[in-house]
Amino acid sequence: MSATARPPRMHHLSAALLLALGSPLAAFAQSQPTAAAASPEARTLDKIEVTGSRIKRTDVEAAMPVTIIQKAEIEAQGITSAEQLLQQLNIASSGPDSLAANSGVAPPGTRGNNGVSGANLRGQGADATLVLLNGRRVAAHGLAGQVVDLNSIPFAAIERVEVLRDGASAVYGTDAIGGVINFITRNNYQGITLTAGADVTQEGGGNIFHGSLLGGWGDLDNDRWNVWAAVNVKQNKILRGNQRDFVNSFQADRGLSPDTRGTPFANIVTGTGSMIGGGLKDPVTGLTKTTINTLRLPGGAGCENGGDMMGDYGDKIWASPGASFGCAWDYGRARTIQQPVDTVQGIGRATFKVGENHEFFAEFMGSKVTSKRQFEAQQITTSINASATQLDAYELNANTKATYDAIYNQLHDYFGNQANLVYGSPIAYRWRCEVCGPRQIETTTKAYRALLGMTGSLGSWDYNIGLSRAQSKAESMTAGGYYYTPQLKAALKNGVLNPFLMPGQSQSQAAYDALAAADASGLQIYEGTSTTTTFDASFSGSLGFRLWSDNDVQAAAGVDVRREEYEFGGPAEWVAGNAYVFGVPGDASNYMSPKQRNVKAVFAEVNLPVVDSLEVNLAVRHDRYDGFGGTTNPKYSFKWQPMDWLVFRGSYSTGFKVPDFAKLFRGVTETQYTGLDLADPATCPKGQYNPDVANCSEQIRPDIITGGNPNLKPEEAEQRSIGFVIAPNGNFNVSVDWWEIERTNTIRSGFNLSTMTANYPLYASNFIRDSGGKIIAIDQRYINTGGTLTRGIELDSNVRGDLAGGTWNIHLNGNYLDTFRTKTFDSLPYSDNLVGEYERYYNLPIRWKHTVSAGWARGDWAHTLTQVYRGGYKDWKPGGVVNGYNPPAWDGNVDAYITYNYSLTWTGMENLKATFGIRNLLNTDPPFTVRYLDDGDGAGWEARVADPRGRSFNLLLEYRFQ
């Protein structure tokens, strides 16, 4: 008897895993055992291809750890999007990949990420996690050009999700370093199903509404054809920072204060030739003051009276004694902390049976995603002798004289006669232009994938052939709050716009008219298109011989040929005359002409049942990229089952990741540093500007250079894992897997300035100087350098039984991050272990995360209670705390974030299923953190860990028409 005809040999482990995979909530909590699970020996399995291998098999436990999440599990949790699903998976990292975490202003290195939600496994980044739809690639987001946007996945048609918790470059090629997520749709569906749902927050804002229609006709077995199609509509409403009380940046006693000097009543700042020149000496302390708000001077009205969300600048927290008379503004409360996103998704598939062993299929997936990011109003920083693209300081003229004189007199009353206090010189200032309104960028992304293919068997061999074309095209437009620079410049220069108005005062009608004339809404910022055309073919089957086992040696082989194309552009007139828009996150140098590269790959895999208890799998893939040459990556894995209830498994593989087009070819951007805190780190320790410290008293504002590097090389990786699965009976199983990923030749963009200035000898070559030795630019472009080392342990356990006429279950899934080390340069050793330490920009290396669920089901009712735990970590330290300042209520640690979700499913009416749920049952706020990012999502909470929506109530109704 051949291996393909032999009935599968079932044992305790198979029974337990079938029980887990076949029941709702297996990934979070097993709530309902199925009949097949209750009697596993009676079940015959078809051969299936599980993510991570090209070889079809009947045995569900393999050498690689794969998490399989069924549609019923997803619905029972009230999950309505791929992003929400990833938030429940502990292998998914706490990174800046969600719609909340990337809701800030896009810096040059990530321009175009508007509205993108990415998948990030094992802390390797969303661009190192491969996302598949039905086992094949989809296009990366048109603007981002790096990652697949999860919003484009047709979630309503998903039958199951397979998550490979291992590297897979030997099987799938580039990007599969952190792991693989494979969204698998239905294959043979008949009937019509209508679904409608809502997820409404208790405190308002951030509501979610969705509906879908799925219809299918024909039966593959009887009619020899099947056609089905689905459409899904979803609306995520906006959630603003001022709608949640935990968003509050003025908590100076705890170490949190806004590091912004752009306030509704403007701060006066230094500038050569300005009213206060290089600063004014405090007559009491003798220290030089470089940022002054007249509201905060002794006897003044106080910063809190200067406008909405104003308060004292935290000069001690930010180690800026020159700003002790400055005011700040809580722009975190003005930010969007959950992006508004409207999504329309559609997918259809037609399958035709040819003979008994062949199927021809055609599939089309399309989506339209519209995201409107909203940010705080423009911060206007003025310059003396401003260029055409800069804004002028506040000059003394007939329109400004009354305000100008009032400011001068207040300064003179306190500071007295000083050489730097010059009447008649322009006032350099920083102003929050609230009258300009919030900045808004609307991004529309249209994506599709068309696929033709055949699958079937020839004798004992299976084949799968496909030809596909996938594209994502996105466009970002200004939607409010942006203004043409020349008109805005004129309105400020002539005093029509007044940056020194107190609450209760308003701008003149002339000011409103000037802003209306300067409005740049509806203007394209940039557009991008990512296209992937792929032909792939794979064959798998028995080699017709055995080693010392009852099972045949199996093999797979195939080819993967694709063309990747990318372009990123926008209107050429950005830099021409009146078309220049102030503060818009786009510039001509970021644009690139269309680029393309061809990729040709061959792969092979052999599964060797050495003896009945030992199986070894060998895989290898060779990829050849235009411009990079060839790379060969093997994978070795084993499964040893010494007893029916015990399996040991392990793997070793190498991986690679080629640079995306943007990192290679994005134009060079030079943007002037707008901060007021930088000095030359060659002479000033850590480069911290301080006018009262020798060698630190000269402030610098160099250009920051960002952009692509055509000389980048692929990253390389090595992955290792070993673990075991114990399943003594059908009601209990536990698995533990240790893993390690080491990446070298990593591609890094602009090291943050604080790191570069604090370690100046290492980065000296990045500081560009003129002939006189003055720093004129800092180079932060992409380079290949250094590496990372990450290790962890994953735990999964299920237990179930009978109770009160029903069935109960408990499921625990956890991830223990043991090691995260980095090195900046290849010549340096790895850093200390950073697990549990704060990482400001990328993945938070949280030591322990888990999801534990308890379920009970009887008759038509099923209950599930889930705890989601995200461990605490050390908090970030602002500059003043690093230098020794200790705020009165300083903690230094961020608490664990623990939430509970409850769901109730009822199936008491024929063809109807209703699920009611409460997310964040206890309405737990995100834990406090002093985190504060200029281009992030606000302050006082961590979007990479927490859900800002709070308690919400969700209802999902599904009705199937016969």
Image: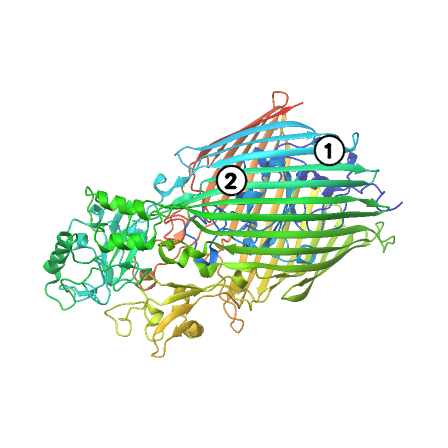
Pointer 1: what residue?
A: 226
Q: Quadrant of the C terminus?
A: top right
**Who is closer to the viewer here, 617 or 197?**
197
SS label for mark 1: strand
Q: What x and y, as percent, mark residue 934? A: 37, 54
Q: Can residue 697 be seen in this view?
A: yes
Q: How far apart are marks 2 and 1 (CA)?
A: 41 Å
Q: Which residue lies furthest to the top in this view?
A: 909
Mark sitting on residue 867 = 2
446 relative to 14 in the view: left or right: left
Q: Where is residue 944 in the image (x, y as percent from the top left)?
A: 46, 49
The residue lying at 73 percent from left, 59 percent from top is 602
Residue 908 location, x and y as percent? 60, 21
Of badges 2 and 1, nearer the viewer stands: 1
Q: Can residue 840 be seen in this view?
A: no
Q: Residues within 10 Å of mark 2 (few under 14, many from 20)?
A: many
User: Mark 1: which amino acid?
Assistant: Asn
Three-letter amino acid code at disc 2? Gln
- Up the image or down, 234 lies above or below 117; here it is above
